[in-house]
Each structure stands twice: as structure tokens, then as C-alpha cells.
Amino acid sequence: MDMQTLWNENRAVLRGTAAAAPSLSHENHGTAYYTFPLSVLRLSGSEDRLNIIAALPLLEACPVEPGTQLELEGEVRSFNNKSGQGSRLVITFFARTLRPGQGEHRNELCLAGVLCKPPVLRRTPLGRDICDLMLAVNRRYGRADYLPCIAWGGLAQRCAGLAVGDGVRLTGRLQSRGYTKVENGTSRERTAYEISIMKLEPAGADGT
């Protein structure tokens, strides 16, 4: 297996509660795709509200209404928002399977790709280190998803030593974060989506 194949992986599992009914997002090759928000609770009790994209056949087999408990398998995707409204980089969860879910909420993902921007190490007002990464994960047919990731504490310091072009494999969770953006003197509430890194393995760590 070559390095290009080895260091590209995008798998995720979510279990949570639909927060609204699906609405039409777009059509592609004759298939309609719908979007809806999924509420996933953290162990702390705080909520991540994540944007789900699902094809109509999945929704026909597993109808979704507000309050429906769901489990999904799929991948995290990004696309550039050229409308001028909201974030420029939009992060969604593309569902490949959809079924009724029970039990504790779940938010787990595995990614492998290549860093496409220099890491940015900074410190919170409380003195905790945090590092921002941008990971490029190739899809088939030459496309790629650009996924913002964050690491904390000692892991943030390790990530700061990486360079553009380095391959990494990581496990973590997809999370939402509210913030306020001021435009032309007007404050607007926005939501950012990022991957919180729990564990990271540099390329070559397993001898490849």
C-alpha cells in the first residue's frame, strides 16, 4: 500500500437526537440529499449540534422527526461557501448509514491525511496551550476535504512541531462552538465546527 493510500482515512460514528425535521439540501446525479441538525451530548452535558447530510433513500428507510434517536456512520466533509453568508468553510457529516439509535450519545471519528497549513500554537486566557491544524483528507476522484482540528495541552505542543506535508492519523470528535463576529459594526452569532483531537500518530510512527 503506498503512502498516498495509507494516509487518507475518514470514518465517523455519531449517536444522538434529531433536533429538527430534514429539509432539502441539493440533488446530485438524480438523488435528493437532505440536511438536518443532530444534537450530540458530551460527557460534560454540553451539546454539539452537527449538520447531517443524508440521501433520500436513507431517510425513507429510517424516517427522521424532531426527537428521533439516531445512530449514523459516515464521514466528515467540507465545502467552500461562496454565498457570502456565514462561514467560508462549511463542515458537515455525510451519512452512509442511518438507523434508530439507543443508549448514550456517541461521537467518534478516525482521520488520516496531510497537514496543508502550518500549525498555529496559542494560549488561552487561562494559560492552556491550544494548537490549530488544517488536515487535508483525499476523497476518490481527486477531491479533498479540508478539516480544521484542535489539540490541547501537551498534545498541542507536539502538534506545533509538525510541518506542512506531514501525514498524521488521529482519533477525536466533531464538535460545534459558538462565537460572535463583528461585521460593519454589527455583532452576529456564528457557529464553528472543528475536530477535537484525542490521539494523534505521525506518519512513520508504525514503521511505514
Image: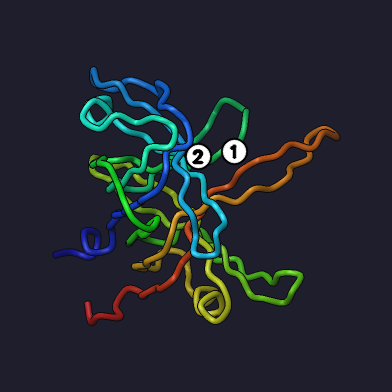
From the viewer's perspective, is residue 208 above or below residue 117? below
Residue 88: x and y, percent? Answer: 57, 38
Mark 2 belongs to which amino acid? Val
Quick one: quadrant of the N terminus? bottom left
Q: Residue at left 55%, top 50%?
A: 176
Quarter of the image where one finds residue 111: bottom left
User: Position of 100 compared to 125: left or right?
Assistant: left
User: Which residue carries the number 1 mark?
Assistant: 87
User: Position of 46 compared to 63: left or right?
Assistant: right
Q: Which of the two residues, 164 or 72, is positioned nearer the viewer here? A: 72
Residue 131: x and y, percent? Answer: 58, 68
Q: Which of the two residues, 178 or 150, is positioned nearer the viewer here? A: 178
From the viewer's perspective, is residue 16 above or below residue 56? below
From the viewer's perspective, is residue 172 above or below residue 162? above
Q: How many angstroms separate mark 2 from mark 1 (CA)?
A: 6 Å
Q: Residue at left 23%, top 43%?
A: 140
User: Which residue carries the number 2 mark?
Assistant: 90
Report helix, strand or loop for mark 2: strand
Mark 1 belongs to which amino acid? Ser
Q: Which of the two residues, 100 or 186, is positioned nearer the viewer here? A: 100
Q: Residue at left 30%, top 40%?
A: 95
Q: Residue at left 44%, top 32%?
A: 66
Residue farthest top in this picture? 30
Residue 2: x and y, percent? Answer: 18, 64
- Find out whether the residues at labels 2 and 1 contact each other: C-beta distance under 8 Å: yes
Q: Residues within 10 Å of mark 1 (few under 14, many from 20)?
A: some
User: Position of 27 compared to 49: left or right?
Assistant: left
Quick one: quadrant of the C terminus? bottom left
Residue 181: x and y, percent? Answer: 74, 42
Report helix, strand or loop for mark 1: loop
From the viewer's perspective, is residue 68 above or below residue 6? above
